[in-house]
Amino acid sequence: MHRRDARLVRWEPAEFVARVRDAMTIYAEAMGYSASVVDNRIGYATAHADRPGFRAVAALDRDGVLLGFGYGYTSAPGQWWHDQVRRAVDRDVAAQWLPGSVELCELHVRPDRQGAGLGCAILLTLLEDAPHPAVLLSTPEGQTRAWRLYRSLGFVDLARQHLFPGDARPFAVLGARLPLTVQSTVDDA
Ligand SMILES: CC(C)(COP(=O)(O)OP(=O)(O)OC[C@H]1O[C@@H](n2cnc3c(N)ncnc32)[C@H](O)[C@@H]1OP(=O)(O)O)[C@@H](O)C(=O)NCCC(=O)NCCS
């Protein structure tokens, strides 16, 4: 368990932007992407910090080295992901889940620190006082640690096997009512 030497901090938007290269480096490592994606993602993530409802949490070691992070913002019409999800789900699901929700845009832990509870702690801290009624996210289909984490926190299916433009992998769109509660039993994906 590596959590003892980690502390969680909330990042204001400017603090997030100041560490955005570190964060996007962890994003690339955690997702198994080439380092060449980092510069491109820095641009997107920096723009996200200006969105209404932006909130971010970082896990840092004693020396301030970034171990993991999560961020999100209020999901709203006109945002690419929001509009994609509105098309992916049926009308009733959209009406029940989309208005006022927070999109969990990124949640990543450095590979050598995964599986020790950090991602769960980041997510719970990020959303513990969120004013939103629900949290939404998309994650690649498959038996992953991310899936186990989301199921353990009560996320349910809003859409499955969805193909976002520009990505060959099928995704699930998941949602959970806030506040999150840890479930006593964890179902498979
Ligand atoms: C997904 C990710 C952020 C999770 O962070 P993490 O620190 O590795 O995961 P955690 O240890 O906090 O939580 C996941 C584990 O806790 C378990 N867990 C959490 N709460 C639980 C509960 N109440 N009951 C049972 N198990 C529980 C999960 O099942 C999982 O355990 P396992 O993988 O050993 O089965 C991280 O693994 C990662 O960065 N993965 C690669 C990138 C990625 O997929 N990001 C998400 C994209 S949508």
Image (cartoon, rainbow, N blue to C red):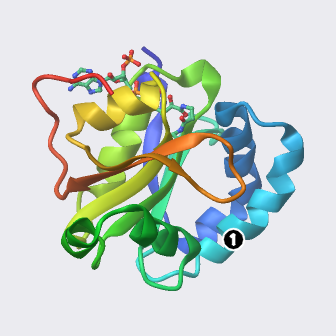
Give the x, y percent position of residue 16: 61, 63
Left or right relative to 126: residue 9: right
Q: In which quarter of the image is residue 178?
A: bottom left
94 left or right, relative to 84: left
Question: Which element carries disc 1, helix, strand or loop?
Answer: helix
Does 134 sit above or below residue 69? below
Res. 67 image quadrant: top right
The amino acid sitting under disc 1 is Thr
Q: Number of labelled discs?
A: 1
Tell me which residue sits at (48%, 34%) in the image.
141
Q: Residue furthest right?
A: 36
- The location of residue 69, given as percent across then percent down, is 53, 47
Q: Pinpoint residue 88: horizontal percent, then vertical percent.
A: 43, 62
Residue at label 1? 46
Residue under the point 24% across and 67% down: 97
In the displayed structure, 162 sits above or below 103; it is above
Residue 28 picture location, percent across and down: 73, 40
17 and 104: which one is in front?
A: 104
Quadrant for the N terminus in the image: top left
Indicate which quadrant contains ligand 1.
Answer: top left
Q: Which residue lies furthest to the left in this view?
A: 184
Relative side of 78 to 183, left or right: right
In terms of image quadrants, where is residue 145? top left
